[in-house]
Amino acid sequence: MMRVMKFAMGLGVAALLSMVAAQAQGPATLTIHADQPLHKVSPTLYGLMTEEINYSYDGGLYAEMVQDRTFLSARSDTENWIPVAMGNARGSVARDASTGPSAALPASMKITVEQADKANAFGLRNGGWWGVLVKPETTYTGSVWAKADKEGAGAVVKVSLVANDTGKVLASATLPALTGDWKQYSFTMKTGASGAASSANQILLTVDHPGNVWLQLLSVFPPTYKNRANGNRIDLMEKLAAMHPAFLRFPGGNYLEGNTIPDRFDWKRTIGPLVDRPGHASPWRYHSSDGMGLLEFLEWCEDLKMQPVLAVYAGYSLQQQFVKPGPDLVPYVQDALDEIEYVTGDASTKWGAERAKDGHPAPFALTYVEIGNEDFADGSGSYNGRYAQLYDAIKAKYPALQLIATTPVKGHAMDVLDDHYYKRAEQFFGDTHHYDNADRNGPKIFVGEWATREGTPTPNMGAALGDAAWMTGMERNSDLIVLASYAPLFVNVNPGGMQWQSNLIGYNAASSYGSPSYYAQVLFAGHVGTEVVASELKDAGDRLFYSVTRDPAKGIVTLKLVNASSAAQELRISVDGTKSVGASAKLVQLSAGSTAATNSIFDPTRVMPVESTVKGVGKEFTRTLPGYSIEVLEIAAQ
Ligand code: AHR
């Protein structure tokens, strides 16, 4: 202290106090009883929760490059589709409610070309989702529905990717001449070898002679993850894969419920060819294309080897609309049963056959079905009845399914209960023992939505510390907590893209980044044993959190340490109940000098995990944890 005092002469009191705070804290001791397993870690503990929020799918994971491809989501005809007249071409555009290619899409965009020729074409441009990412030597796949009137018949439509600043055509496709009937035209466009990747581009569609032309569903896709048609962005899927998720909870969230009953996630309107999907209004204030439909969710699961946790609509929508249990609910119960059959039935079943027709003959494995979302918000108190009716009908047909209630129900079995927590870091620090003494004879727990809400659009290091502290508690209680998922997962960081602050992964059209909270998830889910072992921590302050698991088959004890204090923490660790302990251990560390430290679209790697090897490990060793740090130590213990 003397030394600190001398050095501090002339400094302000605040500076002095913060220096004192940053001194290492007195040693704490942690004893790990590696031979005393307490219980198994749920193999499905870490998963993903997702819904259409913050442009998560449209303008996010779903790789479609055209915004408002069905001309449904704008307030004006030309908000997303700007008329373009080249040279002395002339014309106008307007949405036309009288003709479209299908019952689901009965309207279209009409282009009236008064004057145009090959060199002076008329058409529309689309700016994509805050930009159109074009890369060199890349093939883009697209299609459009179109028809022409008598005068316009024979018109040639050209689709191009064009640089905003120079007008240079980077790739293009010329379609066969149009006819008087609605027809889908498919095309590919390939960019050349020169030029750098950029999102400062637009998609241009032009017509080369006078007449009327109608368009619907212009779609352009870049290469997708695992080359799926109608698939997902590669960078975002790779980020999710790094989280080692065991499950995907979908389709919500509030997105399942919709603001009103007609706006619910009506799964039957999200399957089959895109032209048969009308899309719908999302509760997060924009139109959903439903390009990410039920089958796409399931294929997303397949691609990342996750199990689906399917939430079925349970008769409650956000504006306090509910369906009375009893006969009124019967059609919704049937919809849920049909949905489960679409997921799990073989091709001999009605809905299994429909899935096969949609391109996926093999059924998907399903263990968990959630009945609704956050039904505590239903002021009518109808959930007890709605839940019981759905539960009984689903169990009668699918007895092996585990059914999840979204709020406690009285007088009826609950297999699993979904708890949600959105908190500040401080609150999570004080609540890490939440489940330690919870009833083990009641339902299992799904922590279906949780997050430390600090930092926007994505959480900062302080939030990551809150998250990590909370996860130590979930791991310790993973006999009870069978599933857990952070929410929300995604945010498009462009102005207007975000409806909910603090989201795990941010992106724009060109790139994406993980928040410190994302890396905390990567660390925790990527390093977890199969059993929780007994341990004791002594003399630690109230900012040190930990979890110990082991994997006997691999001979590894995994120790997670969270020091949420600004001060370093010395920790004396002893590992007993094992013949030998390796002399070195793998360390993965996430730390920052400040809780405000964060990543962003402009600075995506400021806070990143660092991997190293720690020497001097043994049955007894000391580790000094830096202030504001999250660590995983993999210790060889045989
Ligand atoms: O994650 C954002 C929202 O929070 C979810 O849609 C809803 O379930 C919860 O209230």
Image: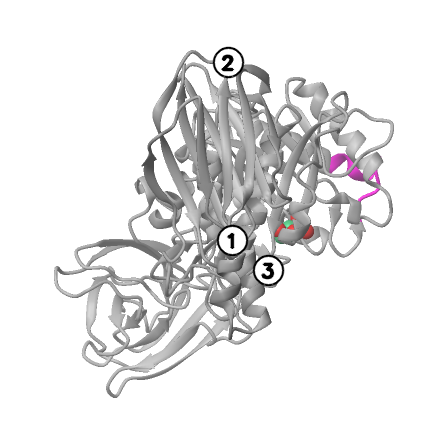
**Measured Cα–Cα span from mark 3 to mark 1:** 37 Å
From the top left corner, tell me how far across and down residue 51 is, in percent: 56, 49
Q: Which amino acid does label 3 sit on?
A: Trp
Residue plotted at (53% across, 76% down):
76
Which mark is first along the chain, 3 or 2?
A: 3
Q: Which residue in the protein does label 1 denote?
A: 23
Q: What residue is shown at x 35% (from left), y 49% (from top)?
A: 235
Disc 3 or disc 1, which is closer to the eye?
Answer: 1
Count every numbered label the image shows and give the total. 3
Amino acid under disc 2: Gly
Looking at the rendered structure, the secondary structure element under dot 1 is: loop
Q: Is mark 3 on a helix, strand or loop?
A: loop
Residue to which mark 3 is pinned = 500
* x 32%, y 47%: residue: 224
Q: Are circles 2 and 1 on residues that touch, CB within 8 Å?
A: no
From the image, tell me which residue sits under label 2.
Answer: 577
Q: Is mark 3 within 8 Å of ligand 1?
A: yes
Disc 2 to disc 1, how far (Cα)?
Answer: 34 Å
Which image quadrant for residue 544? top right
Q: What stretch is highlighted in magenta?
A: 322-331
Residue 132 visible: yes
Task: Give above or below for 464 relative to 305.
Answer: below
Left or right: 91 in relation to 349: left
Residue 368 location (% of width, % of height): 61, 28
116 vs 568, left or right, is left
Q: Pointers 3 and 1 in contact (CB under 8 A)?
A: no
* Whether residue 14 is situated above or below residue 122 in the rendered picture: above
Residue 90 percent location from the top left of the image: 32, 85
Where, quadrant-wise, is the N terminus in this rendering? bottom right
In the image, which is nearer the foreground, mark 2 or mark 3?
A: 2
